[in-house]
């Protein structure tokens, strides 16, 4: 199977559920999670019942991964879905309702670690950690991978319609500080991401913004607002595909997906650098099956299992062993794996409890202006 | 009807379950959120209820008040359009042949049974730049252009799609679409009870159709109008899905701001304060209405 065929087959979680997340559509059945089927499940050698509760994004696992795992380890994985990190956090903040493995993004790993909601991972139980590429084995948001194992990573950039732009939009200027594409631009509605990327455009670190910077960026945003068509809820790829807009601020994985449907779509990470995101496997405090959770995470980091997951979800994988098994048109795709020179200028956003409400309030002012 | 005061035991038997339900699942959680509004964040997942009024101070800053007023204006406009559109519809159903009435009512209620999200996405597919409305209009435009060439005139310029989505028009349109049944149903139930001989009498005694409508039908339908306005205005004021999905860069309503406090900003105390300001405003609306209806009763 080549890359394009499975691009069509796979749909990704950000495409569907995040857009709908605004409606607070929850598909998870938390109440039924804790007790169900516990009695009839057989005991494993490690003393735990052969059950595992996995809380994941939609379409964010290989098509057969859970069945394969049941066949090899004999553990029933009960997967329920969440649509946004906020939903995940809200569910767990009042206590773990019974999840064993969760998939928070990098800033939420920090936030949940700060709130003492995560179990320290015992690396002795995860030998497949060696499959992870070295740059993801130690990351600023979780030094030495104390609480999290990497699952995927992403970079923000500009998706565009090739026939409608004069040149490749390789600077944030076209989105943030220019009326060249007036009324044909959609940017993210996530206040924090927007302020940090404006900071990047101004040559600052995404984690080094001061109150004066926020004031300046707010004024720039208000000035740019008439040129923007929509603040999208992370469904920018749909707007681009439908022809609603010609330039969109989105994640590389999302744009890579629609590029196979429409050859007129391109993607660029601006030369000023961008923001990286990463989704991670974690074990929340109070997990009923912590040993199974470790074993399951270890299985997901396996080369062959990782390859099957990547074939379905098509996000950049931090799993070097799995990447090596993928076809060339995935491995060498510059959208999925931007060149190292570009990535060198990209940063992870740190969780910052003081700044987040300020970003939100400033963005509310921008929208109200 | 028996008075509950003289029949206390049966009344208590009937009322216990709903009162218990209301206390456990409405009053208790709302009290917790109300207490949050006097607190502050003490950590990513902890709220310290310190009795501070800072959240309310922030919530009554001009920034949030202006968003609040804008939401009220959008909701009021939505309600007005619903009333103007809904009244003739309710009249038509009332005066339709009895065998048609259930079907017409079903036509009003049918969209009501479909999930709001599905209806909004369907509307977006219709109104997009390359949506069916624009395709239809484009087809008509080209047809007109072709007709002009037939009679030897210059063809029209190329069709440019109309911007229907991602602006305040789209938000009001979407809200009217969603809330119309809320208006039509109470209007219908008021008009249905109206004694039609009064209309005949008015017409026989020389009043015109418009005068009959304004001086006979509208006053008699007033309870239905008030009920329709209240149950349209209040949900419209708290709408957040429609402005989020169909609105443009300046279409945020107060509910969107509240949603962001509970989710992205993780500032539950402030979100709680904003929510309760909205709830207080609705209480005032309802109190004004019940005072008004009491006055009407006394006057009679």
Image (tube, coloured by chain):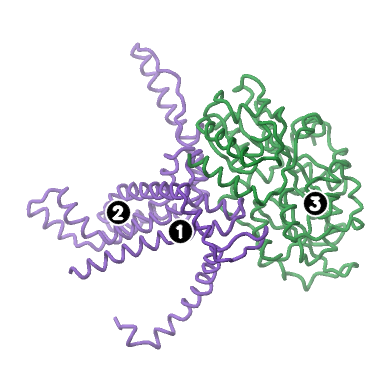
Q: Are labels 1 and 3 on one chain?
A: no
Q: Residue furthest front?
A: A212
Q: Quadrant of the N terminus of chain A?
A: top right
Above-or-below relation of B39 to B151: below
Q: Chain of mark 3?
A: A
Measured in 3D between alpha carbons, the distance from the residue under mark 2 to the one under mark 1, in whole angstroms, is 34 Å
Residue, disc 3: A65
Residue B105: numbered disc: none
Q: Which chain is green?
A: A
Chain letter of the residue beneath label 2 in the structure image: B
**Secondary-structure class at tag 2:** helix
- Residue A248, position in %: x, y? 61, 33
Closest to the observer: A40 or B168?
B168
Locate residue A117 relative to residue B19 in the image: left or right.
Answer: right
Contact? badges 2 and 1 (CB < 8 Å): no
Classify residue A235 by image quadrant. top right
Foreground pick, B13 / B168: B168
Which residue is labeled 1 in the image?
B277
| Chain in purple (letter) | B
Quarter where residue B184 is shown: bottom left
Is disc 1 surrounded by few (<14), some (14 to 19) or many (20+) residues within 10 Å? some
Mark 3 is surrounded, within 10 Å at the Cα level, by few (under 14), some (14 to 19) or many (20 or more) other residues, namely: some
- What is the x, y in percent for residue A90? 64, 59
Q: Are marks 1 and 3 in contact (CB under 8 Å)?
A: no
Residue at image point 50% right, 69% down: B26
The residue that disc 2 covers is B90
Q: Residue at x 52, y 35 (%)?
A: A222
Q: Are marks 3 and 2 in contact (CB under 8 Å)?
A: no
Q: Residue at x 87, y 59 (%)?
A: A73
Q: Secondary structure at mark 3?
A: helix
Q: Can you give x and y, in whole percent of width and height, for residue A331 in the image?
A: 82, 33
């Amino acid at each position: 199977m080549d890359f394009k065929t499975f691009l069509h087959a796979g749909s990704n979680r950000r495409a569907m559920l995040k857009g709908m997340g605004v409606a607070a559509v929850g598909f998870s059945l938390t109440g039924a999670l804790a007790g169900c089927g516990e009695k009839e499940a057989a005991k494993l050698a490690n003393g735990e019942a052969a059950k595992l509760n996995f809380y994941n994004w939609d379409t964010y696992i290989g098509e057969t991964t859970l069945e394969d795992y049941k066949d090899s380890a004999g553990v029933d994985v009960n997967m329920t879905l969440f649509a946004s990190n906020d939903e995940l956090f809200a569910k767990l903040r009042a206590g773990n309702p019974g999840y064993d493995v969760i998939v928070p993004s990098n800033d939420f790993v920090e936030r949940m670690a700060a709130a003492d909601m995560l179990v320290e991972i015992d690396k002795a139980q995860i030998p497949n950690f060696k499959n992870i590429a070295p740059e993801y084995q130690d990351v600023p948001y979780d030094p030495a991978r104390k609480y999290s194992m990497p699952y995927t990573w992403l970079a923000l950039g500009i998706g565009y319609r090739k026939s409608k732009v004069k040149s490749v939009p390789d600077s944030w200027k076209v989105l943030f500080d220019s009326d060249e594409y007036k009324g044909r631009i959609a940017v993210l509605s996530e206040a924090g991401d927007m302020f940090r990327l404006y900071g990047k455009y101004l040559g600052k670190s995404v984690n080094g913004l001061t109150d004066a910077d926020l004031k300046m960026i707010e004024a720039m945003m208000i000035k740019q607002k008439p040129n923007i068509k929509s603040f999208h809820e992370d469904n920018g790829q749909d707007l681009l595909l439908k022809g609603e807009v010609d330039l969109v601020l989105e994640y590389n994985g999302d744009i890579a997906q629609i590029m196979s449907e429409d050859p007129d779509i391109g993607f660029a990470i601006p030369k000023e650098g961008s923001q990286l995101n990463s989704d991670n496997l974690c074990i929340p405090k109070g997990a009923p099956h912590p040993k199974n959770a470790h074993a399951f995470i270890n299985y997901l980091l396996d080369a062959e299992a990782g390859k099957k997951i990547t074939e379905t979800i098509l996000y950049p994988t931090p799993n070097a062993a799995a990447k090596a098994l993928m076809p060339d048109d995935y491995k060498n795709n510059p959208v999925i794996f931007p060149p190292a020179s570009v990535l060198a200028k990209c940063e992870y956003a740190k969780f910052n409890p003081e700044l987040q409400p300020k970003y939100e309030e400033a963005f509310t002012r921008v929208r109200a202006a | 009807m028996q008075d509950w005061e003289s029949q206390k035991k049966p009344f208590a038997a009937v009322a216990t379950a709903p009162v218990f339900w209301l206390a456990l699942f409405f009053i208790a959680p709302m009290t917790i959120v109300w207490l949050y509004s006097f607190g502050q964040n003490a950590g990513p997942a902890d709220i310290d209820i310190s009795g501070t009024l800072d959240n309310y101070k922030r919530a009554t800053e001009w920034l949030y008040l202006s968003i609040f007023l804008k939401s009220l204006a959008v909701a009021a406009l939505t309600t007005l359009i619903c009333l103007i559109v809904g009244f003739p519809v309710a009249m038509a159903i009332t005066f339709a042949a009895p065998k048609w009435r259930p079907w017409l009512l079903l036509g009003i209620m049918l969209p009501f049974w479909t999930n709001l999200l599905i209806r909004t996405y369907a509307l977006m597919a219709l109104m997009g730049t390359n949506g069916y409305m624009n395709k239809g209009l484009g087809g008509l435009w080209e047809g007109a252009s072709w007709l002009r060439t037939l009679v030897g005139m210059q063809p029209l310029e190329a069709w440019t799609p109309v911007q229907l989505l991602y602006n305040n028009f789209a938000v009001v349109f979407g809200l009217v679409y969603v809330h119309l049944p809320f208006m039509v149903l109470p209007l219908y139930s008021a008009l249905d009870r109206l004694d039609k001989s009064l209309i005949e009498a008015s017409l026989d005694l020389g009043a015109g159709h418009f005068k009959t409508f304004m001086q006979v039908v509208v006053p008699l339908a007033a309870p239905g109008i008030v009920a329709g306005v209240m149950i349209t205005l209040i949900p419209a004021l708290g709408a957040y899905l429609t402005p989020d999905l169909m609105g443009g860069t300046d279409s945020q309503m107060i509910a969107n701001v509240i949603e962001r406090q509970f989710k992205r900003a993780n500032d539950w105390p402030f979100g709680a304060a904003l929510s309760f300001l909205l709830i207080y405003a609705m209480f005032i609306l309802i109190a004004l209405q019940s005072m008004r209806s009491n006055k009407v009763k006394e006057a009679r």
